[in-house]
Amino acid sequence: MQFMIFVGAAVTLVFNIPYAWATVTGRVRPNKVSWLLWSIAPAIGFFAALSKGWTWGQFPVLISFSSTALIFLCSFINRKAYWAIGRFDFICGVVSLLTLIVWAMTKNPNLAIALAIVADILASVPTLVKSWQYPETESWEPFAAGVFNAATSFFAMSIWNFTSLAFPIYLMVVNGLLAIIVLRKKWMKGANHELSR
């Protein structure tokens, strides 16, 4: 079963490293707010879990925050490789950070997971909006890889409850939604092309 965890991590790297390179070359323009917070949230979760000992179930989280942090850092290399941050993005980022602080302070694991999901939703909103309005500034591949990587978490689970299931399920949903939103323009172009023939 641990084999699937490594497969998921490999898939994540295969798609996120080219996305990072596309960021450097300016072919995609990630929203810094989303990618920063997507790095912070799993990093907190990883190191919090690591304080209680290492398990292979933490490996997908390690890959997740390290690859998103790489993309965030790459967005500083090329001035054209970022999306301008507006008031809406800033507000989402601040509220998400506040939620993360409360998450780090809580001792209730179910509340902590719920707050982590809220923080991640708020971090995702700027990219969801940008992808809907300007899908050409994004790539669907890393989000599809995120769905697969989150799904591999189920192979490492020994206990099936809210604490273990909530975040992987959420990650599958939000990454799937982002991939579909980015792909919709290509699908629409394909449909329009067929109609014009």
Image: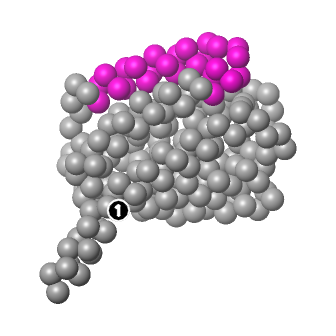
What x and y, as percent, mark residue 182? 34, 57
Residue 97 quadrant: top left
Name the residue furthest right: 158
What x and y, as percent, mark residue 42? 57, 35
Q: Residue at x 15, y 81 (%)?
A: 196
Residue interval drawn in magenta: 89-113
Amino acid type, label 1: Leu
Q: Where 55 sits versus 100, above or below?
A: below
Q: Where 178 sits versus 21, above or below?
A: above
What x and y, as percent, mark residue 197? 17, 86
Picture colour scheme: one colour
Q: Residue at x 26, y 27 (%)?
A: 88
Q: Residue at x 52, y 64 (%)?
A: 14
Q: Where 183 sits versus 102, above or below?
A: below
Q: Where 172 sits versus 32, above or below?
A: below
Front residue of this view, candidates 8 and 17: 8
Q: Is 174 displayed left or right of 6 in the figure?
A: left
| Residue 138 belongs to the span the image colors magenta | no
Name the residue furthest bottom: 197
How many marks overall?
Answer: 1
* Crowd around label 1: few <14 · some 14–19 · many ≥20 (10 Å): some
Residue 62 visible? The answer is no
Determine the main secondary structure of the stretch shown in magenta: helix
Query: Which residue is under mark 1?
Result: 183
- Element assignment for label 1: helix
Front residue of this view, candidates 138 and 26: 138
Q: Residue at x 41, y 38 (%)?
A: 124
Name the residue furthest front: 195
What x and y, as percent, mark residue 9? 62, 56
